[in-house]
Amino acid sequence: MSRPLLHGRFPEVADMLPHLRLGRAPTPVRRLSGLTDAVPVWCKDDSVYGEGGWGGNKIRKLEWILPDAHRRQARTLLTAGGLGTNWGLAAALYGREHGLTTAIALVDQPVDDHVRGQLARLRRSGAVLHFTRTKRRTIATAPWLFLRHTTGHRPPYVLPAGGSSAVGTLGYVEAALELADQIAAGELPEPSHVVTAVGTGGTAAGLALGLRLAGVRSRVVGAVVNDSLRLDGPAVAALARRTERLLRERGADFPPVGLAADEVTMVRDWLGPGYGHTTPEAERARSLAAATASLHLETVYTAKALAALLAMADDGRLGPGPVLFLHTHGPR
């Protein structure tokens, strides 16, 4: 497998920030027609990323997380998510393939056919499931979970929901470098904005940092779909800065980026009643994407992000474009 673009740019970090290729890069880009007349819309389709039992944006994070867990000699990944967590399922499936057990604290969310299907897949994945039900109870039981999943003298490798640690965020620094190469090769024009769903912040933070490292001027717009975490501009920019510090601590040498809070745009208007709740706007965006672009979306993340893109384009907030929609869902 080819080495990651991040190692090509900063070869000095390769030993301290190892990478494990789990998907085929680059993911395709294409023009989407029929969605809106307000701006040209392009899509980078990360839903096809990943060669295991699940795909999408979580796999790019795991490419950095799994080898870092092995570097620390951990045997278990300990994380959290909603009952229908895509992140937890991806971690369990790919972790199992690479010799790691995954334990997940599960928080309640609205239950529909998708969530019931995800729970069945989680149970088949071999993950250890802890039904902690609420964020408060998950935090309260965290010390017990840590001790429960310590093996000998090896503590678990602890990850926030969505894998949005500084290490996991490298997945979308890499994706941004990949996008920059596609722009340079003429596969798509440089977008004025890149719009994506934001559930835990790592994808948006990595994109914003990676685009700046690559000299691409596109602005990241995140459609917030999670009401249980702080996901505003300052929080996402802070995660980008932690990832920048991680690169420097592991040996990378580059001029400071220091992403500021006003360099990313986080919008909450399409969240609806909360995480996992569908909205009429998301349902319309999902139907439109399927009918005009053969694009499969779901209403927890990606349809809400596309709904945000379309509304912001129609009211002029994205300017003349072009605009890139990052498609991150990845069922198999």
Image (spheres, grey):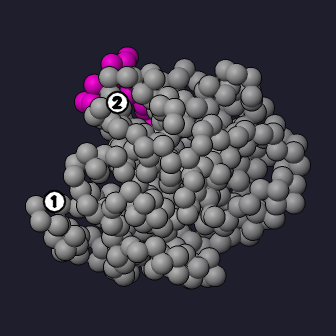
Q: Which of 280 and 63 is in front in this view?
A: 63
Label drawn at residue 218: none
Q: Residue at x 25, y 61 (%)?
A: 75
Q: Which of the pair 268/36 is nearer the observer? A: 36
Q: In which quarter of the image is residue 167?
A: top left
Amino acid type of the residue that numbered disc 2 sits on in the rendered structure:
Ala
Q: Is mark 1 on a helix, strand or loop?
A: loop
Please tell me in which quadrant of the rendered image residue 10 appears: top left
Q: What residue type is labelled 1?
A: Arg
Residue 328 on image: x %, y %: 61, 53
Image quadrant occupied by the C terminus:
bottom right
Inspect this view and state whether residue 28 appears. yes
Membership of 117 in magenta stretch:
no
Question: Which residue carries the number 1 mark?
Answer: 154
The magenta-colored residue range is 249-261
In the picture of the structure, the residue carrying the numbered disc 2 is: 14
37 to 111, vertically: above or below: above
Dot 1, crowdedness within 10 Å: few (<14), some or many (≥20)? few
* N-terminal label among 1 and 2: 2
Camera-side residue of 294 and 134: 294
Q: Distance between the residues labelled 1 and 2?
A: 24 Å
Q: What secondary structure do most residues of the magenta stretch adopt? A: loop
Residue at the spot x=82%, y=44% of the render? Answer: 32
Q: Is 260 contained in the magenta span?
A: yes
Question: Tag 2's secondary structure?
Answer: loop
> At which x and y percent is residue 192?
68, 31
Q: Locate residue 134: give its quadrant.
A: bottom left
In the image, residue 180 lies at what x, y percent?
60, 27
Q: Residue at x 48, y 78 (%)?
A: 124
In the displayed structure, 139 sits above or below 304; it is below
